[in-house]
Amino acid sequence: MSDEEPDDENDTEEEVEEKKEEREVEVEVEGEGEGDVEEEEPQVSTSLNEEMVKEGLSLLCKTGNGLAHAFVKLEVREKELTDVTFIHNFIHLRYVDLSDNLLRDLSPLAFLRHLLWLKVDNNRLISASIEELPYLQIASFANNHIKDCDGICHPRLVSLNLRGNAIEVLSGLNPNILSNLHTVELRGNSLKSTAGIYLPKLKNLYLGQNAISHLEDLENLEQLTTLHLRDNLIEVLEGFSSNMKSLQYLNLRGNAVAQVQELEKLQVLPMLRALVLLENPCSDEAEYRLEALVLLPHLERLDKDFFEEEERNEAAEIRQRRKEEELELQKEREREKELEEAEDTTQEDLTTE
């Protein structure tokens, strides 16, 4: 689009990510209604062949024993592939991109024992299951028809992309096997809850554009630094835990949080520095920014703007005044309690006489 905001070189990583999300959402909205009812055409079998491989091979490197050379990168896209059995002849491959095809079965990739990087976006996969690949570090299965996370068992995997699938429940990601996994991308699925996420080493979790209304099992994410929950159905901020001692960036844009007082529940997050709440009902409140800073004094940025020193001073004054008022109220309650106890004692004495 011509009015896109360019990425500023001074943007933080989170800001760049937000702009990227905004563009993707715009594209999705513009494309709504186009081909909503799409009948699947009868599938014609197209197999990977020698000519395709020759055309897609690149990056000549030494083989594992260092005594020979082989091409280690293969890119075969937009060939309407349905069968890649031929790939087992190229056991030295380390980087494979088979995106934009018609694949339903990835079992032939089990022969690629040296594979480091795999991309199979925009196919017809219903499962991401592949026999264990011992060196696989980055895997992308975006925009398929995958329904669960079962069968992902690669011990060196650090980044997993399952965006734009049909996953309804977060299960199947075994923390004992996926001990190196630090980034999981699950935007655009059908999740209704965060229940089932047991990955203590995870650092970045992207769950935007789902149907999440309940936050559960987050206490297991002790090393998480970035959590994206944009465009879900969250109304209350129950579920955050003091165990989440590393969380610095939280994106809740486009949810249904109505009361700014809900932010009080984020006080359990000691490292939270950046919070995005745009397009929530609470962000329309008059003193929204100030109240957020009163409740979360360690916050450095709300939405796209950093807090100014003047805002911090005003928030500190309000916080101190409320603290004094609360202490005075507490003293008043204690005085009333003492009076009631004194009256009860007097009444008992009179009754005894």
Image (spheres, rainbow, N blue to C red):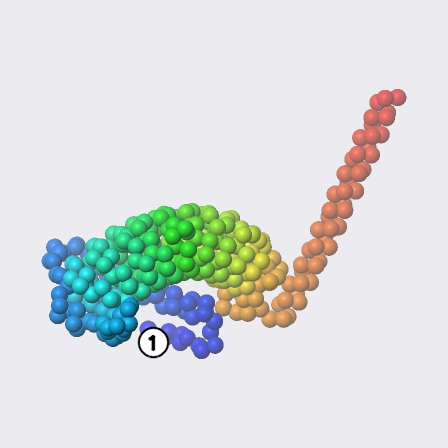
Q: Which of the 4 image quadrants contains residue 188?
A: bottom left
Mark 1 nearby-residue class (10 Å; few <14, some 14–19, many ≥20): few
Look at the image and tell me whether residue 105 can be seen.
yes
Q: Which residue is mark 1?
A: 2
Residue 52 horizontal side relative to residue 342, left or right: left
Question: Which residue is located at x 50 percent, y 54 percent?
Answer: 222
Look at the image and tell me whether residue 212 can be seen.
no
Question: Which residue is located at x 16 percent, y 72 percent?
Answer: 54
Question: Which residue is located at x 31 percent, y 65 percent?
Answer: 117
Q: Residue 249: x and y, percent? A: 50, 62
Q: Residue 191: x and y, percent? A: 37, 50
Q: Is residue 50 above or below residue 324?
A: below
Quadrant including the C terminus: top right
Q: Nearer the viewer, residue 181 or 67?
A: 67
Q: Nearer the viewer, residue 203 or 157?
A: 157
Q: Nearer the viewer, residue 70 or 10?
A: 70
| Three-letter residue code for mark 1 | Ser
Residue 317 horizontal side relative to residue 222, left or right: right
Q: Which of the 4 image quadrants contains residue 306?
A: bottom right
Residue 182 horizontal side relative to residue 164, left or right: right
In the image as oriented, which residue stretches furthest toward the right? 353
Q: Residue 24: x and y, percent? A: 34, 65
Question: Which residue is located at x 50 percent, y 65 percent?
Answer: 303
